Amino acid sequence: MTIRDITKPVVLDVEYAGQAKTPWGTFSAGFNAQTKINRKDWDPNWNVALEMGGWLVGDTITIIGVQGTPTFFINGVLHTASWGQDSLAAALQRAIAQSRT
């Protein structure tokens, strides 16, 4: 994740939400994702002290409902847009096989 020119890896909790056939004959899979980050990892420089004590923005931030076209790397190979279930499964199988060698 990149925030204000600082990039750090984050782990997403991902749930498969199903798939549907697109008008172009391919299949798109849907996923729901969420994560928690510590905003101090990205060197924040803004907050506001509250009158009753504490701060307006806490250190732990929960990011829910990550949306968009799935774009990710499998062993350094970029995968974007929609693809068929078979091609995704094949890419994952290749990655698993390479990790065992």
Image (tube, helix red, strand yellow):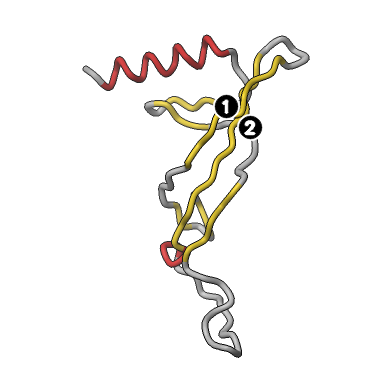
Q: Residues within 10 Å of mark 1 (few under 14, many from 20)?
A: few
Amino acid marked by disc 1: Thr
Give the mark nearest the N terminus, 2 or 1. 2
Cβ atoms at labels 2 and 1 below 8 Å apart: yes
Q: Residue at x 53, y 46 (%)?
A: 34
Residue 14: x and y, percent? 51, 36
Q: Kindly identify the amino acid type of the residue bearing the numbered disc 2.
A: Thr
Side (left or right) of 1 relative to 67? left
Residue 19's quadrant in the figure? top right
Q: In terms of secondary structure, where does tag 2 sit?
A: loop
Give the residue at x 38% y 14%. Answer: 93
Q: Residues within 10 Å of mark 2 (few under 14, many from 20)?
A: few
Would you identify the image quadrant in which residue 48 lies?
bottom right
For label 2, the residue is 69
Residue 41 numbered mark, or none? none
User: Which residue in the structure is indicated by mark 1?
Assistant: 80
Which of the 4 image quadrants contains residue 49? bottom right
Residue 75 at x, y = what percent?
37, 26
- Is 87 situated left or right of 98 in this image? right
Of residue 72 and residue 28, the one placed in the foreground of this image is 28
Q: Residue at x 67, y 13 (%)?
A: 26
Q: Distance of mark 2 from mark 1, alpha carbons?
A: 7 Å
